[in-house]
Amino acid sequence: MSTGLAVHGAFSLKAFNTFGLECTAERFVEAFSVEDVQTFVRDPFLNSSLSLLLGGGSNVLLTATHLPGTVLHVAIKHREVLQETLDYVDVRIGAGEPWHDFVLWTLENGWGGAENLSLIPGQVGTAPVQNIGAYGVELNDICTGVHFVERESGTVGYYTREQCAFGYRDSVFKKELKDKCVLVSVDFRFTKRNHLLKTHYGTVEDQLTAAGQLPSPKTISDAVIAIRQSKLPDPAKLGNSGSFFKNPYISKEQFSFLQSIDANAPGYLQPAGEIKAAAGWLIEKAGWKGFRRGDAGVHALQALVLVNYGQATGPEIWELAQDIIADVQEKFKIGLEPEVNLVG
Ligand code: EPU
């Protein structure tokens, strides 16, 4: 191996996944710059042994306690203003920047666009992969493009927002480019005035009213933080990976069936005619909310979130998830899919 990168053997990933699961990686390498990533992919041994690209570890379930091969942790820190006018600012952010710190920085600057995406765990570089979204805004509303290192050639490539093919928790990086590139930076455009504020989703509006505040990027961020803190467990205190499942798209007939069970079943009509059902509601209705088996559990305040009370293993969390999937399938004839990436 001819590389200047530090290669660690038998490395514990416990501090590198927000579920707090114990898993020993055969090899672990950290990249602090684009050049580090290029050095990594140009090393035939490291590149071919890559088994996990790790950002903040906030959207991954390590399903085994040992991970063969090499884990690459991208830790590129970079914040750059590319250009600005009176109306907007364009920025480029390193893949290793913690997402929420970045959002707070945009708010300190008075910029609008990222406020609804406050307090999401993880790093900037993994946000485009699953097109993170919350409270009526998705990353694709503010992202203008993505730089990545191609694993085959080691060259830097760029995809515009359109080329990223963003969808609901989906992008080209989960499809055609899956396993083919390493994201190194993300470009965004934020508003400096005439902000496009979104308060219609869920209880954001109520939260603002209760706090006696008019909508602004900062007050919306405060409201979103308050809502998230009231429902979603803090990974630093209780291991979890946010929403474990995706909200399923179902047919009108399937939705009528849910309404026959409960007239208040939540469902959101999509442009193409199908309905986005609420996985959390289905899991709660099936009786799993607050369920605990050993140290693996379903969060008591938000059934979409699986939690590790301390000593749960990856296989135990995955077994619980599969039991939930089977039960929801049997009771509602709806197939839930994990939103987290399964590794191992
Ligand atoms: N619901 C229940 N029981 C539950 C959870 C939810 O009945 O235990 C119902 C709610 O009452 C509501 C509906 O399900 O009618 C939807 O719930 P909520 O608005 O809380 O959002 P969600 O669908 O559970 C999604 C995202 C979250 C995001 C929130 C807010 C997905 C998979 N999850 O959750 O994203 O924060 O909306 O926008 O799309 C994440 O991806 O990690 C994540 C936390």
Image (cartoon, rainbow, N blue to C red):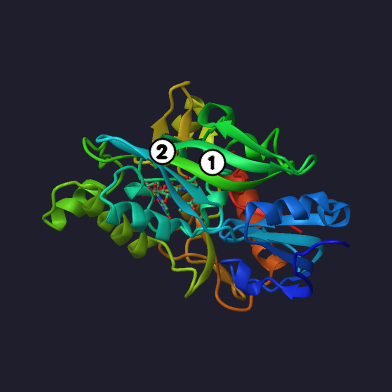
Label 1 amino acid? Arg
| Label 1 CB-ligand 1 distance < 8 A | yes
170 to 241, vertically: above or below: above
Task: Read off the residue under disc 2.
Answer: 142
Q: Is residue 154 visible?
A: yes
Is 190 or 68 nearer to us in this picture?
190
Query: Where is residue 235 shown, x and y percent of the image?
Result: 49, 68
Task: Read off the residue under disc 1.
Answer: 169
Q: Is residue 195 left or right of residue 117?
A: left
258 to 228, vertically: above or below: above
The quadrant of the rendering that contains the N terminus is bottom right
- Please report whichever mark, 2 or 1, sits nearer to the chain's N-terminal start: 2
**Mark number for residue 192?**
none
In percent of the image, x 29 and y 53: which residue is there?
A: 107
Q: Is residue 246 left or right of residue 273?
A: right
Label 2 amino acid? Ile
Query: Badge 2, how many Cα within 10 Å: few under 14, some, many 20+?
Result: some
In percent of the image, x 44 and y 68: which residue is there?
A: 234
Query: Where is residue 211 shown, x and y percent of the image?
Result: 15, 58
Q: Is residue 263 visible?
A: no
The quadrant of the rendering that contains the C terminus is bottom right
Please, what secondary structure does the residue beneath circle 2 have? Answer: loop
Is 341 or 53 nearer to us in this picture?
53
| Label 2 CB-ligand 1 distance < 8 A | no
Is 136 or 55 nearer to us in this picture?
55
